Image (tube, rainbow, N blue to C red):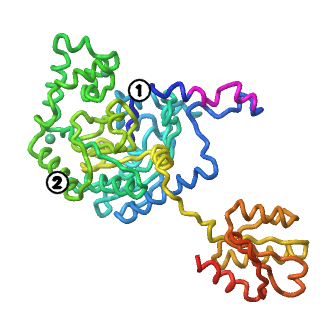
Amino acid sequence: MPRRKNDNKNNNQHQRRDPFHKEELKQKGLSEKFARLRGMKDVIFDENKYWDLVIKKASDLAEVYGFKKIQTPILESLELYKKSTGESSDIVSKEMYSFVDKNGEKVAMRPEITPSLVRAYVENGMLNMPHPVKMFSYGPIFRHEKPQAGRYRQAHQLDWEIFGEASPVADFLLMLIAYNLFSELQIDVELQVNNIGCKVCRGEYIKKLTAYYKERGNRSRLCNDCKRRLDKNPLRLLDCKEPGCGALKEDAPPIVDFLCEDCKKKFTRVLEYLDGMNIPYNLNLSLVRGLDYYTGTVFEIWAKEENEKNAAGQLSLGGGGRYDNLVEFFGGRPTPACGMGIGIERAVAKIKTGGIPLENREKNSVFIAQLGDAARKKAIGLFEELRKSGFIVKQAFTRDSLKDQLEEANNLGAKLTLILGQKEMNDKTIMMRDMESGNQEIVDYKKVKSEIEKRINTI
Ligand SMILES: [Zn+2]
Ligand SMILES: [Zn+2]
């Protein structure tokens, strides 16, 4: 659930790349009415290598820490989000893709993953499973936001949730996973951590906070959104990036002064664990996150070099927190829980600028080229045989010319090319070409596998 904050800086840049840009579409010959929807994105070919890397690392970490994979529908009842994410949140009040379906049912495309997982936990009787129940999921979320650089209306998130664990070690575990994930992706991050209190202590704080903002001279300085939020969700005022509201925030009563003993103790424990593992964090007392269900610990993951920009309203890489009342609210037995979401697009954008080397499977690949129909048939057989033996094989069986095939082998970055022509067929041999040096050798066809292995293992 990365928080999306107001940022208008990159608007112009985005407008230029707006798929609705008529001129651009005309040049490409695509009718405007078929164009990609605004704020949506195609992830094409090689960019998926970055996506795969992020998803692979996240899945591996999920497994290591005992999270089990779960998939839930993208379409859910609208009520689910109204009652969990909250009607006063920006997500529900402004950004939902919701509609009435053919049976007259009000449905919504999920704007975040957590509510579905809480629903699934209760609905699938996981209350009776051994606890904690830890789950991992990833997939698209939909928010009808103003299209801006780095924000998409269909975005993708990685999501971890822990049910049935009240200990702050669980909160810390999520932060540890986030930190490990970004470290392994070679992205420097700093966690932003806060505690927004529980049922017991938050009520008193909200009263004090509301009174502060209602003081004469203060209320009039608030932006219109905050004036509206003041009665519904005053915590959100601490999060507002409007300059007037930001200035007022400086003198607002800090929540730490109001935390009950239990909240204070847990908050301290979380910070001790972070210190113990040398995980960089910042105690961010104005971090509240925009959703209704959070209690206690909340956190976000910010890229390090972007901290200053972040404070001015950049996107975070992800975030999460504790929601101890939500399971009970959905009809389950009281169950403490916490969770975290990380945005895949943002992580991918970061890795691309960081220049992390991607694993290149092609460097050990073997290309099979053929000349003539009889050789082609034999080459197809050889291809399948090598593939089944675990070699990384490539081909261009639709091509006839050897020159074209060698060019293709080069483009694919193959290590070796095997060439099978009429002469080799007659002699029961095959030509082996080292693509880097250009050296060619004739080898006995029967020994082709061991000859490849010799050359590939020497890398
Ligand atoms: Zn408390
Ligand atoms: Zn405001």
Kind of residue at disc 1: Ser
Work out whether residue 302 or residue 304 is closer to the camera in this orientation and state it.
304
Name which residue lies at 43% across and 63% down: 60
Q: CA distance from mark 2 to mark 1?
A: 37 Å
Q: Position of residue 397 (x, y in %)?
A: 81, 66
Name which residue lies at 85% across and 62% down: 399
Name which residue lies at 49% across and 35% down: 151
Quarter of the image with the C terminus is: bottom right
Q: Where is residue 444, by image quadrant?
A: bottom right
- Check mark 2 vs ligand 1: CB closer than 8 Å? yes or no: no
Residue ID for mark 2: 272
Label 2: few (<14), some or many (≥20) within 10 Å?
few
Kind of residue at disc 2: Glu
Horizontal side of residue 439 vs 230, given as left or right: right
- Check mark 1 vs ligand 2: CB closer than 8 Å? yes or no: no
Horizontal side of residue 136 vs 355, given as left or right: left
Dot 2 or dot 1: first in sequence order is 1
Query: Decide: marks 2, 1 in contact (CB < 8 A)?
Result: no
- 389 falls in the magenta region: no
Q: Position of residue 346 (x, y in %)?
A: 46, 43
The majority secondary structure of the magenta stretch comes to: helix
Which region shows up in magenta? Answer: 15-27
Work out whether residue 146 or residue 357 is closer to the camera in this orientation and state it.
357
Residue at the left extreme of this rendering = 261
Q: Is residue 211 above or below residue 177?
A: above
Q: Position of residue 62 (x, y in %)?
A: 39, 60
- 24 falls in the magenta region: yes
Can residue 108 be seen here? The reply is no
In what element is the residue under mark 1? helix
Residue ID for mark 1: 93
Q: Position of residue 192 (x, y in %)?
A: 27, 42
